[in-house]
């Protein structure tokens, strides 16, 4: 009898890609794929453990899966970062888990379930080359992972321990996967890795993301290409020139800078040129929208450092910023730093920074009132006499940047691009209205 299998994917989009690859491995292994763990014979929890909140979420999901196991005699397997982080401790925490795999052993999932291999904390890594990938969502976008691991040694980060050294994929392999996604109907391709802009250094001897993007941009089915997880010190001239050249490369970069204060950046072991990198990108592509990530409450951070960061934000360099409170991790080198910041102070600073960025966002959207742009429609539901449309502009990344919302007298097709006028904002959601001719159009948004 064919067994059913379900995967719960936790954490970032990189984990999502790995889960989709594991679904392909399972399907090739003869398993029937289902979406509901309560109906699955095999339950896989693909975990994240980058920060304590992620580890807590992973542990909650494991407990939920074990509760299902008690009811219907399912088998539960745990994969990814949490077992890599905990090592042998995972069996002490969850003795009823049927097996586990670390980040470097995900290709062995079918063999683990079939008892052809034992549980193992393998060499750190990840599913870097796809064989058969099953998209977990019908949405018109997909993530494309171009590398695994990281060679940077940020003092607060344990990614190198969880994922190993940086390893770029081969351009030919990446383009092959991209073409398969295009044939599957993907309209927006989102480029990801722990560090996308270092792509190629280990394989080709130089930064090669510009070369890769130019090849991906020539796949006509992709109306939008979006770049995430750029590293400040490796955003080079070639990359920016390629972004300017191709209209289907979104004028958008996600580049975590973590802070602006050089004193804090030095303690973080991050590039000290964060502000310079931001300004360089803006000088080359003035209309670009930058998203960043910031950490408050890092050991040694002072009110002066926070003020410097807020002043930089108020100058309007960023369109969006995710702000996170520093969390001690005994396996990270920052754990040993002195002058710890109290959690309540870190939280207060987080709120101050978020408020500053939100005021910038509101000002930017106000200046765009009545500007014409396009949305990629992702949802259309009947709302009284109208249809409520939810979509995104080129400067809104899925799940993190809010949506663009409008009403239409007629239903719109999801996965298509439409012309809209920006009217304002409600929180980080943008309000818009249709303008004639209102039909699916090519994505010319600059």
Image (cartoon, rainbow, N blue to C red):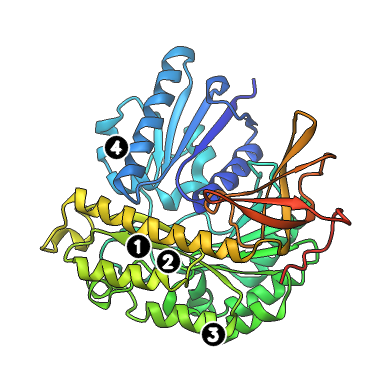
Distance between the alpha carbons at the discs numbered 1 and 2: 17 Å
Distance between the alpha carbons at the discs numbered 4 and 1: 20 Å
Q: Residues within 10 Å of mark 4 (few under 14, many from 20)?
A: some
Q: Are marks 1 and 2 in contact (CB under 8 Å)?
A: no
Distance between the alpha carbons at the discs numbered 3 and 4: 49 Å
Question: Which of the two discs, 3 and 2, sits closer to the camera?
Answer: 3
Badge 2 marks a residue whose secondary structure is loop
Q: Residues within 10 Å of mark 2 (few under 14, many from 20)?
A: many
Distance between the alpha carbons at the discs numbered 3 and 2: 18 Å
Residue 283: image tag: 3
| Residue in view at x 53 percent, y 35 percent | 7
Badge 4 marks a residue whose secondary structure is helix
Q: Nearer the viewer, residue 435 or 379?
A: 435
Distance between the alpha carbons at the discs numbered 1 and 3: 33 Å
* Mark nearer the N terminus (3 vs 4): 4
Residue 301 makes an appearance in the image: no
* Mark nearer the N terminus (4 vs 1): 4
Question: Which of the two discs, 1 and 3, sits closer to the camera?
Answer: 3
Q: Are marks 3 and 2 in contact (CB under 8 Å)?
A: no
Residue 90: image tag: 4
**Residue 435 image position (x, y, % from top left):** 82, 55
Q: In what quadrant of the picture does the C terminus appear?
A: bottom right
* Mark nearer the N terminus (1 vs 3): 1
Residue 256: image tag: 2
**Residue 362 image position (x, y, % from top left):** 52, 59
Mark 1, residue position: 160
Locate residue 393 relative to residue 14 in the image: left or right: right
């Amino acid at each position: 009898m064919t067994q059913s299998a379900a995967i719960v994917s936790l954490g970032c989009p990189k984990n999502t890609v790995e889960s989709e690859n594991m679904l392909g491995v399972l399907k090739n292994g003869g398993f029937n794929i289902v979406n509901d763990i309560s109906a699955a014979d095999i339950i896989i929890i693909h975990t994240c453990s980058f920060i304590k909140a992620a580890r807590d979420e992973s542990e909650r999901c494991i407990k939920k899966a074990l509760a299902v196991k008690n009811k219907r005699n399912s088998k539960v397997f745990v994969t990814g970062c949490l077992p890599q982080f905990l090592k042998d401790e995972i069996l002490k925490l969850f003795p009823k888990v049927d097996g586990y795999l670390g980040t470097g052993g995900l290709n062995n999932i079918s063999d683990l379930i079939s008892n052809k291999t034992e549980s193992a904390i393998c060499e750190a890594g990840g599913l870097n080359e796809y064989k058969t990938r099953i998209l977990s969502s019908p949405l018109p976008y997909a993530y494309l992972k171009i590398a695994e691991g990281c060679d940077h040694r940020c003092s607060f980060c344990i990614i190198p321990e969880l994922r190993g050294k940086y390893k770029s994929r081969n351009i030919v392999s990446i383009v092959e996967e991209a073409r398969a996604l295009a044939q599957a109907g993907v309209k927006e391709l989102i480029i990801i890795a722990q560090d996308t802009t270092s792509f190629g250094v280990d394989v080709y001897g130089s930064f090669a993301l510009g070369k890769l993007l130019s090849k991906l941009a020539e796949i006509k089915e992709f109306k939008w290409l979006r770049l995430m997880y750029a590293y400040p010190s490796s955003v080079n001239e070639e990359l920016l020139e390629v972004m300017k050249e191709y209209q289907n490369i979104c004028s958008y970069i996600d580049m975590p800078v973590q802070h602006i204060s050089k004193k804090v950046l030095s303690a973080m072991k991050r590039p000290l040129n964060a502000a310079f990198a931001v300004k360089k990108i803006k000088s080359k592509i003035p209309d670009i929208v930058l998203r960043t990530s910031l950490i408050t409450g890092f050991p040694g951070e002072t009110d002066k450092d926070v003020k410097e960061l807020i002043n930089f934000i108020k100058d309007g360099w960023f369109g969006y910023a995710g702000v996170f409170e520093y969390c001690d991790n005994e396996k990270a080198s920052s754990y040993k730093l002195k002058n710890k910041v109290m959690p309540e102070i870190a939280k207060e600073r987080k709120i101050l920074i978020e408020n500053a960025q939100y005021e910038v966002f509101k000002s930017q959207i106000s200046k765009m009132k009545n500007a014409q742009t396009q949305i990629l429609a992702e949802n259309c539901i009947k709302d009284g006499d109208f249809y409520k449309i939810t979509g995104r502009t080129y400067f809104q990344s899925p799940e993190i940047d809010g949506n663009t919302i409008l009403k239409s007298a007629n239903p719109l097709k999801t996965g298509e691009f439409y012309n809209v006028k920006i009217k304002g904002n409600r929180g980080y959601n943008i309000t818009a209205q249709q303008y004639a001719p209102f039909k699916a159009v090519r994505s010319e948004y600059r």
